[in-house]
Each structure stands twice: as C-alpha cells, then as structure tokens.
C-alpha cells in the first residue's frame, strides 16, 4: 500500500493540533457516532484528526466523515497484534508525527514500549492518551473464559495506565474516573456521550401521538448483553397488559440476552417485538414509531459510571423516558419533567412505573417536547469541545 492511499482529503483543516485516533472495532456498531461525529466536530474546532479503524486499506467515508481503514485479520488475539503493528508502520512513515495518539485499552501493550522509546531519545511528542468508555459488562456468574480473560486484562491495563504506561487519560464520566482510581495528574478530562440533534429531531415530526391514547409504544435500542434486565422489563410489560393496560414493547439490538427476549416474544401474543441490529442511520425512523424510550439497567457500577448514548438519542427524538433511578441517568435528567422513574430494576418496580405511564399517556407528547428541548445540552459538538479542552490541556502541560 502506498502512502498516498492513506492521505485524508484536503477538506480536513490543517492545524498544528494533529490527533491520531485509533479504534479497535469496525465502525458499524450502534455506538459508531461516538467516533465519527466527534471526529467531525473536532475537525470543526481546528484539529487535524486521523481516525483509524479496522477496514480494508485506504480512506473510507461513513456519514460523509472520512476515516482511515487498516486491515485486521480474523484470528483471535493475533489479529490485534498484527493490526497494531500495521498502525505503527503507518505512524513511523508519517513525515510529521501527530502531537497526540488517542486510543483504548487494547492498544496499551503496543504503545507503552513506543512511549518508553520516545522518552529514551528525549522527545516530548507524540503524547499517548488512553480513553476508557466502558467497564467489562458481562456478569461474572455467566462469564466465559474469554470474558474472564478480558476482565483481567482490562484491570491490569488500568493499573499500568495509572502507573506510567500512558501520558494521560480521558474518560466518559467523573464516576468512571473514581472507580478506576485515576490519579489527578493523569486525568486530563471527561467527555460524555452525545447526540446528533438534526438527525434525531426528524423523529418528532413523524410520530403519531394520537395512537398513545389507546396504545403506548415502548422501545429500547442498544446492546442486548446479559445483565441489562431487558427480559425483566419485558415481563413487567406483559404483567401490565394483563392488568388492562395497552402497551407494546420493541427491543432492537444484538447480544447474549436476545435468545431470552425471543422466547418472551413467542409467549407475548404480539406485545413484545424483538428486532436484530439495524443500521445506525435507520434508528431515528424506528424511534419515530415509539412514545417512550426505555432504559431498564440495574444499579450496578458498570452502569452507574456510563453515559448512555441512547438516553440522548431518545431525548433528541422527542420521546418521554422511562429509566431506573441510577447515577448515569440521574446525573443527566434527575429533575426533568419528561421522565418516569423506576425505583429499581425489578418487575414490581417497573410495573408500578408502567401504571404511571398509562395514567399519564395524554401527557406523553408534551413530555417528549420537553425532552427534545433538553437534548441541546448533550450534543456531539459539546462532547467534542470537552475532549478538545482535555487534549489541549495535555499539550500545554506535557507537549
């Protein structure tokens, strides 16, 4: 592959602030906006961003945002080593090195030796920055050997990062920083999830609120990994319908809990609908069919420290919210008048909250409007601004 195949277009602003941003997952998941939309907003702020992701070699566009594809083989474990060696080859060939290399936990073992080499030869840049967006999510009681290996790896990498394996760290929330015990001198900043307002606001204009007088349509879009209590919520919906309330519940996504949800769908007589992963650009159209967005997560550390993208997408699309009263939700919408709170993630608590939704179904349109107005505080532009400030702080302090 020639160097010219790696060059981003001239539309990207040239700047002294050059960021090489490495993703170890293909840009095709429900959370793809985190990388692509933030990259776009950083470029608008004057950063030269080279976003790298596993893909066929060369420049690609997704949602009109350019990124650099570097091939990753499919062999377990070895694929990450080969992928990162290819990234290093690209990095060493660059005529002008980036000021900052931003990456996730899978990249630390490769970049730590490069950091040591940089220090040995007396250079100050590039600066190596670790970004953590999530804790290990699979419940321990049903973890496979791969899950257990990933968990041990994650916390070993976190310890190394806290003790000098990186120059700085950024995280998704302040609670995440506390749980990971990141030293203050290592923590450069916090940048939460966000939403692309224009895209999701289209859902509001397509929604039929009149249907909610007879039938309230609930929806969850996101990961279906075990431990999110999606099946628990589904059973609460069935219980509500047996008590003469009229709900439908749609789950959209992929994950290990999907089999349980499909079994629930079979016994629900049409009340529960389970749909596999849909393309990111189609999510607003699906949300337009709903009246209430659901976030049923239990009160556990891995959820408390998160910043759920779906919460912001529900808000931007003009949905009322049904959520458990846990920190990742209350930190955003604790005093909001467009949310129905569940005290805990249990069938009884959800059933109690569904009673409130049913009794207030005439107010759902007003609540959705208030949610869409509040979403303006939680855009990818705001998230990118926070990330930019964190990286600029690091450059001032260490670059």
Image (cartoon, grey):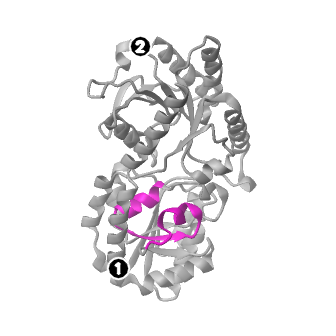
Q: Secondary structure at mark 1?
A: helix
Q: Is residue 205 above or below residue 197?
A: below
Q: Could you tell me residue 357's position as x and y percent?
A: 45, 81
The disc, 2 or 1, on the residue closer to the chain's N-terminal end is 2
Is the residue marked by circle 2 packed among few (<14), some (14-19), or many (20+) residues within 10 Å? Answer: few
Q: Specify the quadrant that holds the N terminus.
A: top left
Residue 1 got which mark? Answer: 2
Q: Nearer the viewer, residue 315 or 230?
A: 315
Q: Could you tell me residue 20's position as x and y percent?
A: 46, 27
Q: CA distance from mark 2 to mark 1?
A: 56 Å
- The magenta span reads 309-336
Picture quadrant where residue 338 is located: bottom left
Picture quadrant where residue 42 is located: top left
Q: Quick one: which residue is furthest to the front in this view?
A: 397
Q: Secondary structure at mark 2?
A: loop
Q: Could you tell me residue 367's position as x and y percent?
A: 36, 75
Question: Residue, x 42% and y 11% (percent of image)?
Answer: 95
Q: How many marks?
A: 2
Q: Is residue 323 magenta?
A: yes
Q: Taking 169 as reference, is 289 left or right?
A: left
Q: Which residue is mark 1?
A: 212
Residue 32 in view (yes/no): no
Q: Could you tell me residue 390's position as x and y percent?
A: 49, 39
């Amino acid at each position: 592959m020639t160097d010219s195949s790696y060059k981003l277009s001239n539309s990207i602003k040239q700047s002294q602030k050059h960021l090489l941003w490495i993703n170890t997952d293909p840009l095709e998941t429900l959370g793809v906006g985190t990388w692509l939309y933030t990259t776009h907003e950083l470029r608008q702020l004057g950063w030269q961003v080279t976003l790298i992701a596993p893909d066929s070699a060369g420049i690609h566009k997704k949602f009109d945002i350019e990124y650099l594809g570097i091939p990753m083989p499919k062999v377990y474990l070895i694929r990450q080593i080969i992928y990162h060696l290819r990234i290093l080859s690209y990095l060493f060939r660059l005529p002008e090195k980036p000021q900052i290399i931003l990456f996730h936990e899978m990249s630390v073992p490769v970049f730590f030796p490069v950091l040591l080499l940089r220090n040995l030869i007396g250079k100050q840049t590039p600066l190596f920055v670790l970004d953590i967006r999530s804790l290990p999510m699979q419940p321990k009681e049903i973890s496979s050997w791969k899950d257990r290996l990933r968990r041990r790896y994650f916390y070993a990498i976190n310890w190394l990062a806290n003790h000098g394996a990186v120059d700085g760290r950024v995280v998704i929330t302040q609670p995440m920083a506390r749980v990971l015990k990141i030293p203050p001198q290592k923590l450069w900043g916090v940048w939460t999830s966000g939403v692309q307002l224009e895209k999701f606001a289209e859902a509001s204009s397509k929604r039929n609120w009149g249907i909610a007088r007879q039938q309230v349509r609930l929806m969850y879009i996101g990961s279906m990994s075990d431990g999110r209590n999606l099946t628990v919520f589904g059973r609460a919906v069935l219980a509500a319908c047996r008590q003469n309330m009229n709900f439908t519940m749609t789950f959209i996504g992929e994950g290990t809990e999907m089999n349980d949800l499909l079994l629930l769908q079979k016994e629900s007589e049409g009340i529960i609908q389970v749909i596999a992963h849909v393309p990111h650009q189609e999510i607003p159209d699906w949300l337009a069919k709903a009246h209430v967005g659901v976030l049923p997560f239990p009160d556990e550390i891995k959820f408390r420290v998160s910043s759920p993208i779906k919460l912001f997408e529900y808000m931007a699309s003009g949905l009322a919210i049904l959520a458990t009263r846990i920190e990742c939700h209350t930190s955003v919408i604790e005093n909001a008048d467009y949310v129905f709170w569940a005290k805990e993630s249990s069938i009884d608590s959800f059933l109690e909250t569904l009673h409130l939704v049913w009794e207030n179904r005439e107010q759902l349109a007003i609540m959705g409007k208030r949610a869409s107005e509040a979403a303006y505080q939680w855009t990818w532009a705001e998230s990118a601004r926070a990330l930019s400030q964190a990286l600029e702080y690091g450059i001032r302090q260490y670059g």
